[in-house]
Image (cartoon, rainbow, N blue to C red):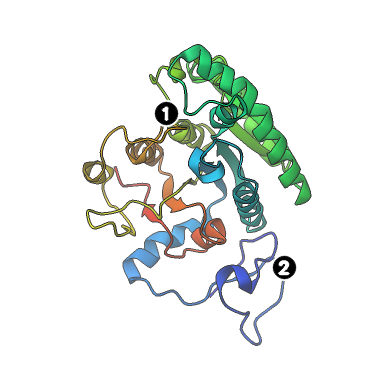
Amino acid sequence: MWCARARGVVGADVLGGPRPRGAPAASFLLYYPPMKESDNLLRERAVLRDARRVVVKVGTHSIAKKTGRPDSAALRRVVNGVCELRKMGPEVLFVSSGAVAAGVEALGLKARPAEVSDVQMCAAVGQPRFITEYERLFAARGVKIGQVLLTHSDFADRRRVANLRRSLDHLVRAGIVPVINENDIVADEELKGLTFGDNDWLSSLIVKLVHADALVLLTTVDGLLDAEGKRVPAIGKVRDALKLVKPGEKGSLSKGGMDSKLKAVQNAARSGANVVIANAVQPHVLARIFAGRDVGTFVPGSAL
């Protein structure tokens, strides 16, 4: 099966199969080896191949060590994945957590502090560390990035919303990857836990703002897990899936958990976007997702 969607070639090492003999070798063609999925799931996931605009969100624990220090290997893996995805065709907006955790490590703290002013201090120290590393890694792939720091108030005023939409549109159309994070230094309401969570909710707002076709939430597990710890390949109703997770589960360096991801999924689905929750450490995870492979937990845009 071939797809004329890609701007560049994703090789056999990404998708697991050589180009068939006699098949055209044009640079915009992408080969998908046969998949071992049920026909229904295959048909549902196939819509991901046509995604034109994608929001990718990565959580703190996927890109930082236990101390909070940015994990260079993990960051490189995620950046390479975003660049691979862009070569397949879609415009990509990248939402990344990790600034507060990096500040926690840099300041020698043992865990994320409880006081808002201390969290803001951690964000101020940590954000430059993360964006500098991202700039270096994307530049090595020939990709320019633009830092976008947002707060809840940016979505509360129509003129600011319109301006933000124009700015993000202009960035992606210019071939620049927006690297989006909450402006934790001034976002007092977020740090008190009243709004976004660990960028999950923010990523769903970005999906709606820029009319993205899909959202990928990269985390430390293979997707939504059932009571036996097995991956759930797809869910039909988010409200049913919410019953499988405990509210408020989070780590020592971050605020989000699977329940916050599912609420973000529900919000993104309201705009018709398809969502995948997947493990950030899986090889070529983004390329495989948008080739329609059975990776992570797929949530169709109709799954409210």
Residue depth check, mark 2 versus mark 1: number of the one nearer the observer = 1
SS under mark 1: loop
Name the image quarter holding residue 47: bottom left
Residue shown at 34% from the left, 39% from the top: 266
Residue 121 place in picture, x, y as percent: 58, 17
- The reply to whether residue 59 is visible in this rendering is no
Residue shown at 72% from the left, 43% from the top: 175
**Closest to the observer, 229 or 5:** 229
Residue 154 place in picture, x, y as percent: 53, 18
Identify the mark at residue 27; answer none if there is no mark.
2
Image: 91 above or below 68? below
Number of numbered discs = 2
Task: Give the farthest residue toward the bottom.
Answer: 21
**Closest to the observer, 15 or 43:** 15
Upstream in the sequence, badge 2 or badge 1?
Answer: 2
Q: CA distance from mark 2 to mark 1?
A: 41 Å
Residue picked out by circle 1: 197
